[in-house]
Amino acid sequence: MTPWHAAVCRTAESLAAALACDPGVPDVDTALCARAAVLDHVATVLADVVPRTRGQATRRVVPLTLVETDPLAALGHVLRGRRRPELGRSPSELLDPKRACDPLTGHWAAAGRHALIAGRDWTGHAVGPLDPAAAWHAVGEVAALAQAVAVLDQDLLAAAGGRTDVAAVIASTAGLRLAARETITLAAPDGPPRAGGSPPARPDATAINEALAARSDRPSTLPKEVRRLTHLLDQAPELTPHHIRAGALVTRDLCVLAARDAVSFTGADLRQELGDLARCLHAAARHDRGEFALNPVRARVLEFQLRDLRATTKLAFANGQGFGPEESTALARRLPDVVEILADKTRAQIDNARWALPDRTEAAELPYTFASSTEPAHTPPSLGALSQAAAAAGALREKAAPPSRPAPEASAVHALSAARPSIRPARAVHPAAVAPRNGPGLSR
């Protein structure tokens, strides 16, 4: 085993350990620094082994036809368009092995250090000339690293807490996971026969594959992702009509999938209520009078969240499987909040003159006019549909939510307990216990 291969294996083991960790909140700058070091090395090896992957940086999205016909070129295309993170601390400080940090941050830092060592060994000609089998082996190894980074991007985006710079860095490598996965398939030892014999086993890819398989067995956190969507919609200062329609479309699909197994607190099914809500949301998602935002903004974190939920629903429809009674019921209790926020945000955008639409009235003097909630000719159809959806959401909440607990009876013990100061010492909350889990999002 060459020094370069040993460093790549240690990088893979660190990424596999990060994949195996429970979703937490690492130091985001450390993770970004390590991520950049790993992808830099992947790009360097790929450019040296496969010269056609070289070229100038590009911001264009990788076409799916390129992923199918030439995965290596697609992976190079994605890597050329990656953005460099802007960090306030130096890599030597962020990746310092002696710095105290949580386990997840430590795994990220170790991956970054080993990737830098692998880069030094590679550029120092420690590898030597590669025969075809060894070249394919090197390509498969670095593609496995890229795939692990792409999967960890979901947790990193969730931990960033709405930082637009992190979202921009991750968005610049859209398609990385797909291109890396196809490249791994192409470079697999059991693939088509190649000159030079079969390459040796890849312990690095094995560790990453085992970690990815373990992540797929984790319990679903879909209700938490819907709660995060609710928070992102509520905090967004500006929303475009596309954001509203995309949110209605995702929520509609979640209603349809949850209707299969969701039950109320008393055990009654919620198919009627969820069906009524889905019909209203379908109208809100599909009806379009040409309205547009006067000052559109890119809500990247929200778009990533919508895209991730959309991918989840499409996969569930394709597999013909629901979410199960427990998760469906939890979804049914959270969906009314999303619907009501969508309706409130739509009305707020219209009332604050943030949207416009074509003026098709006979007395129109200008081709466009402000959207209005009071003039039917100038009212976006999504507003009425979302108002009906909000009413249906209220009926769903009333039937799905458990009854409220009665207030405790007044007593001298309760009064004294409330007046007596607590003597329990404050306990620090571990960062891994406070981060919602979700992943990347929807663009048109």
Image (cartoon, rainbow, N blue to C red):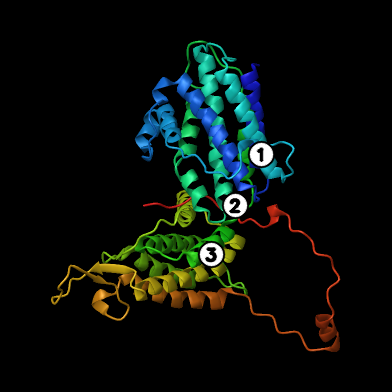
Q: Residue at x 26, y 68 (%)?
A: 357
Check whether the beta carbons of the residues at disc 3 and disc 2 lie within 8 A of each other: no
Q: Earlier in the sequence, mark 3 or mark 1?
A: 1
Q: Residue at x 46, y 45 (%)?
A: 171
Q: Please tell me whether residue 301 is drawn above or below residue 190 in the rendered image.
A: below
Circle on res. 159: 2
Which residue position holds label 1? 93
Tell me the distance, in whole angstroms, between the alpha carbons under discs 3 and 1: 34 Å
Measured as percent of width and height from the top left, residue 187 is found at 50, 24
Q: Quadrant of residue 5?
A: top right
Measured as percent of width and height from the top left, residue 36 is found at 54, 36
Q: Residues within 10 Å of mark 2 (few under 14, many from 20)?
A: many
Q: Residue at x 59, y 22 (%)?
A: 120
Q: Amino acid at mark 1?
A: Glu
Circle on res. 295: none
Mark 3 or mark 1, which is nearer to you?
Answer: 1
Q: Is residue 413 left or right of residue 179?
A: right
Q: Residues within 10 Å of mark 3 (few under 14, many from 20)?
A: some
Q: Please tell me whether residue 276 is drawn above or below residue 171 in the rendered image.
A: below
Tell me the distance, in whole angstroms, between the alpha carbons under discs 2 and 1: 20 Å
Q: Earlier in the sequence, mark 3 or mark 2?
A: 2
Q: Nearer the viewer, residue 393 or 93?
A: 93
Measured as percent of width and height from the top left, residue 23 is found at 64, 49
